[in-house]
Image (spheres, grey):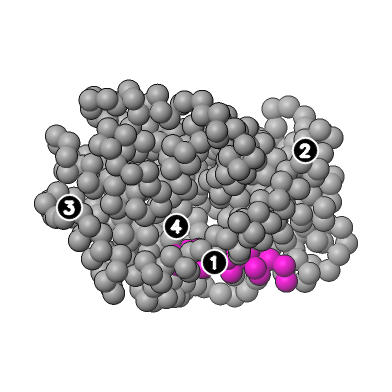
Amino acid sequence: MNKFNSRLGFILTAVGSAVGMANVWGFPYKLQEGGLFFLIVYIFFIGLFSYVGLSSEFAIGRIAETGTIGSYEKAFASKGKNPKLGTAISILPLIGLVLLTIGYAVVVAYIMKALFDSLTGTLMTSDVASWYEDLTNTKYSVGIFHLLVIILTLVNCLGSAKTLEKSSKFMMPAFFILFIVIAIKILTLPNALEGYRYMFRIDKSQIRIGTVVSAMGQAFFSLSITGSAMMICGAYLHKDEDIVYSSKMTGLLDTIAALVAALVMIPSVIVFYMDQAGGPGLLFQVLPTILQNIEGGRLFAIILYLAVLFAGISSLQIMFEVVVESLDYKFDRLNRKLVLYVLAIFVFIVGLNIEKISQWGPFMDIISIYIIPIGAMIGAVTWFFILDKKTLMDEINMGAGKTYGETWYKIGKYLYTPLVIVICILTILM
């Protein structure tokens, strides 16, 4: 099996999987609402989930040396249980990831359309409300861009770990650099400092359980701990690499990405007296309005949407890789490239018919509210209650710079796993 050539390549690939819309339009919205208290709680949960949640998914991936199906089979087999049970429960997380891939490709197509219109100047001269309406409520409005997104993702997956690593080494640094350039520009705007003060304010009304739940859920989704995605990164990791260290670095870089996005979004909204917004409205309504009203707005629109496009493609290529590797493991006579092509065609055709936000929105709600949290819960319970403890701990300590023992395991089993279950229940109920 192909392996990553370096620790940096692995970390950037994992960050590429984690960094996405949760960072760009979810985190800024919630930070704007919750202030410094939200940020402190968020950082605590990012640290916890990276330390045990992300590292456990990397570990089982490296144990199994494959994707979702093989990882669950190995977990069950480690305790002498029937691997077919692992196959059965792996289906929901894997299906959830396939559906997420379909929906995610649509929003990346929106981003590519926004980038194209920034390049041509159309975005700078259009009425934003009309442009957004055409973008999100016209059938097949982004069809050609949708196809280009699928092709780019496909190309990045053809070489398995090698192309994933090469593309991530380019796209992730580019994402950070481009967003930092925009953040510096925003800093020069009148009253931008007021936006930063607002970001980091202590709002006593937000010191409540609702903010804690919001921060916990945001941290969880931001790291892409889905019970299916991150195992593939571990599968391509060499045995001499420190899993926990790499997990912590992934969490740190993911947090920096979210903060850099917030440093762009929140001061912009404050400076131009825009309404607080999250989701597609922030990226495709609020920001175009702001960009039309700043000097050099067209250039900064190009930079912004290019950066977000890099993040989107990076996430998509990991999603593709997980599905292909899982099927390749289960049906070893399949041709890898053929499976990639079939998956790409399937994702494109289904996605093409839900491009309107009235269809895409409910589709993504079902996935993010029900399927993904349940899949993550299945994963956490499997790694800490079914997978053999010694097998897991041996893998965690293989290549580690320090020895992890009972404390690490108990945090995972008695703190992390119950929190995942709580997140799943709260997400469904709320």
Q: CA distance from mark 4 to mark 2?
A: 31 Å
| Residue 100 among magenta residues | yes
Estimate the spatial distance between the alpha carbons at disc 2 and disc 1, rounded to whole Å: 30 Å
- The residue segment tinted magenta is 88-103
Mark number, residue 123:
3
In the picture, the quarter occupied by the C terminus is bottom right
Query: Does 386 appear above or below 209?
Result: below
Q: N-terminal of the two: label 2 or label 1? A: 1
Label 4 and label 1: CA atoms lie apart by 19 Å
Q: Earlier in the sequence, mark 4 or mark 2?
A: 4
- Mark 2: give few (<14), some (14-19) or many (20+) Cα within 10 Å: some
Spatial separation of the CA atoms under disc 1 and disc 3 = 31 Å
**Which residue is located at x 11 percent, y 51 percent?**
125
Most frequent secondary structure within the magenta stretch? helix
Q: Residues within 10 Å of mark 4 (few under 14, many from 20)?
A: many
Which of discs 2 and 1 lies nearer the camera? The answer is 1
Magenta stretch: residue 411 in it? no
Residues at discs 4 and 3 in contact (Cβ within 8 Å)? no
Nearer-the-camera pick, 34 or 205: 205
| Label 1 or label 3, whichever comes before in sequence order | 3
Image position of 119 with respect to 348: above or below: above
For image coordinates 36% across by 36% down, the residue present is 266
Indicate the amino acid at tag 2. Ile
Which of pointers 2 and 3 lies earlier in the amino acid sequence?
3
Q: Is residue 37 left or right of residue 259?
A: right
* Disc 4: which residue: 316
